[in-house]
Image (tube, rainbow, N blue to C red):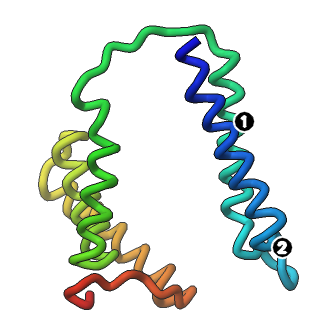
Amino acid sequence: MMTKITPLVMILIGGYAAYKGSFEYGLWINKGPGGGFLPAVMGLLLIITSLLALLKKEVRVAYQRKNFAPVFAVFIVLLFIKYLGMMIACCLFIIAWLKYLEQYSLGRASAIGVGTTVAIYLIFKVWLNVPLPTGMLGT
C-alpha cells in the first residue's frame, strides 16, 4: 500500500497544476500558448505517468547513494543560480553531471556544457528575449 501513496499524491499535484494552468493562468491567449500552457501539459503528463505507476507491479528497489544525486543537484543548482546567475549555474551543472555521474572526460563535458549554455542563452535571452536570473554577480 505504501508504494501507492506517492503516485496518488502525484496525481493530485498534477491535477492541481493542470487545473491552474488551464483555467486560471490561461491555456491559450491571442493565437498562442499562454502562461498556463506548460503547467497544464506538465500536470497532465504527471497524471498519466502516475496512473501508469499505480498500475505497475510492485518492484523492490535497493536504494543507493547515486540515486539521490538528482535531488541534491537541483538544490545546488538553485543555490548557484541565486549567487552566480542562471547561465553560469547551468554550465557548471552540466559539466559536473557529465564528468562525475556520466564519466565523460573533462574536455568533452566542458565542450557540451559550454555549447548547451550558449544554445540556452541564444534561444532564451537573444531570440525570445526572456529575462533570466542574473544572481548576485550580475551575470
Look at the numbered disc 1 and give the secondary structure of its residue: helix
Q: Give the residue displayed 71% in from the left and 28% down from the top.
A: 51
Q: Amino acid at mark 2?
A: Trp
In the image, taking residue 101 as reference, residue 8 lies left or right, namely right
Q: In this rendering, is residue 4 above or below 139?
A: above
User: Of residues 44 and 110, which is closer to you in this image?
Assistant: 44
In the image, what residue occupies the spot 25% across and 49% down? Answer: 97
Within the image, what quadrant is residue 8 found in? top right
Please determine whether, in this image, residue 2 is positioned above or below residue 74: above
The residue beneath circle 2 is 28
Dot 2: element = strand
Q: Name the residue nearer the viewer: 136 or 107.
A: 136
Residue closer to the observer: 110 or 25: 25
Q: Where, quadrant-wise, is the N terminus in this rendering?
A: top right
* Residue 18 point in image, percent of width and height: 75, 54
Residue furthest out toward the left = 106
Q: Position of residue 72 (x, y in %)?
A: 27, 46
22 to 29, vertically: above or below: above
Q: Residue at x 14, y 48 (%)?
A: 105
Locate the C terminus and report the quarter of the image it occupies. bottom left
Give the class, few, some or many, for how many residues have Cα within 10 Å of label 2's Cα (few <14, many ≥20).
some
The answer to which quarter of the image holds residue 87 is bottom left
Q: Position of residue 34 (x, y in %)?
A: 75, 76
Residue 89 spot, x, y in % from top left: 27, 69
Spatial CA distance of label 1 from label 2 is: 22 Å
- Image check: 46 left or right of 44? left
Please name the residue that numbered disc 1 is placed on: 48
Around disc 1, counting alpha carbons within 10 Å, would you say few (fewer than 14), some (14 to 19), or many (20 or more)?
some
Q: Amino acid at mark 1?
A: Ile
Please report whichever mark, 1 or 2, sits nearer to the chain's N-terminal start. Answer: 2
Report the residue at 33% width, 44% height from top: 71
